[in-house]
Image (spheres, grey):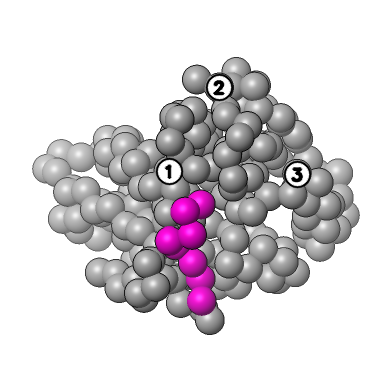
Amino acid sequence: MRNKMNKSLSVVVLISGNGSNLQALIDAAGQDEYPARITAVISNCGDAYGLQRAQDAGIAQRVLSHQEYDDRDAYDQALMTLIDSFDPGLVVLAGFMRILTADFVEHYSGRLLNIHPSLLPKYKGLHTHQRVLDAGEIEHGASVHFVTLELDGGPLALQSPVPVLAGDTAEALATRVLEQEHIIYPQAVKWFAEGRLKLVDGVAMLDNKAIAIP
Ligand code: GRF
């Protein structure tokens, strides 16, 4: 389905790779009643498959390679300029494998979401599925959160747990978690677009109530 152009919230999605979360957002935005549209997809990697997904959906795609910038500050400044050329109301990180500068995070404060494959605050960082298995956890999951200066540490908007099953591999667990990611990310973006999900004084609020997770 095509991205609709008559919807209120403009969303820019940042990716580095496969873009299955991007696809979930594209699919959601293709529904008539969905209150957001994706105006651009930006990748720091030219070979990210998500760029193809964007092209297939008729969405503008841009590549901004970090390798062409001397340092993180210069890259993030260029990235901000590119993002802002699309005038988004929300910036969505969907597997964007970059650590962001304070300037960037502050510039998009309250309108920058990330999805992380764990039940935050547990298992920040990389390789979450293997770490969950190694620790013998019985539960794992995915989290959507507002981005703040603390890596994977911003206020939580939405979480979805999954069981860890006997014999699970990291790949099996990743697949189970991703299925939930593809549900909760479009849901969180929808709430944000409807004005129901907000960051107020550093607290994530849904319908004017602080979100309490768990
Ligand atoms: C997802 O697991 C997401 O939680 C993490 O990076 C992965 C991106 O996957 N931030 P995809 O590119 O959306 O398929």
Name the residue carrying label 3: 86
Q: Residue at x 45, y 30 (%)?
A: 32
Does the magenta portion include 146? no
Name the residue carrying label 2: 2
Secondary structure at badge 3 equals loop
Name the residue carrying label 1: 186
Q: Residue at x 44, y 29 (%)?
A: 31
Q: Amino acid at mark 2?
A: Arg
Marked residue nearer the N-terminal end (2 or 1): 2
In the rendered image, which quarter is residue 106 located in?
bottom right
Marked residue nearer the N-terminal end (2 or 3): 2
Taking the image as drawn, is residue 71 in sight?
Answer: no
Q: Residues within 10 Å of mark 1 (few under 14, many from 20)?
A: many
In the image: residue 140, left or right of residue 111: left
Rounded to the nearest whole Å, what is the CA distance between mark 2 and mark 3? Answer: 18 Å
Q: Residues within 10 Å of mark 3 (few under 14, many from 20)?
A: some
Secondary structure at badge 1 equals helix
Q: Position of residue 3 (x, y in %)?
A: 57, 28
Seen as rendered, the residue at the extreme bottom is 201
Q: Residue at x 45, y 38 (%)?
A: 34
Q: Position of residue 175 (x, y in %)?
A: 32, 35
Magenta-tinted stretch? 193-200
